[in-house]
Image: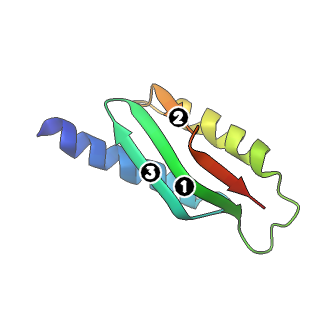
Amino acid sequence: MAHNVEDAKMTRLVQRELGRRPIDITRMTIRYTHGTVYLYGIVRRLRGHENLDLKEEMNIIYRLLRSRNGIREVHMEELVIRA
């Protein structure tokens, strides 16, 4: 049970971090389990950020998440980047 509570807490933390970035995560699924973040689905630029390099933004997000306590790995292999 303790893992489920911690996983839910960390999932919300990841959602908040992603929500601060200029990306649309409405079609993204975010999972956290046992120290690993999984990002699936589609990520797009937010309207008004047409010059944003999404690949670079995802690299920044990767580094940001990896720097957080409790996150050992970040998997984005199943994430589709759409302009």
Q: CA distance from mark 2 to mark 3?
A: 10 Å
| Relative side of 36 to 1, left or right | right
Q: How is the image coloured?
A: rainbow
Query: From the viewer's perspective, is the residue at label 2 or at label 1 nearer?
Result: 1
Q: Amino acid at mark 1?
A: Gly
Residue 23 position within the rendered picture, expressed as x and y whole percent measured from the top left: 67, 61
Residue 77 position within the rendered picture, expressed as x and y whole percent measured from the top left: 58, 37
Task: Please tell me whether mark 2 sits on a helix, a strand or a loop.
Answer: strand
| Relative side of 10 to 64, left or right | left
Task: Please tell me whether mark 3 sits on a helix, a strand or a loop.
Answer: strand
Residue on which disc 3 sits: 30
Q: Earlier in the sequence, mark 3 or mark 1?
A: 3
Q: Residue at x 28, y 49 (%)?
A: 8
Q: Residue at x 57, y 39 (%)?
A: 76
Front residue of 61 and 29:
29
Residue on which disc 1 sits: 41
Residue on which disc 2 sits: 75
Q: Amino acid at mark 2?
A: His
Q: CA distance from mark 3 to mark 1?
A: 9 Å
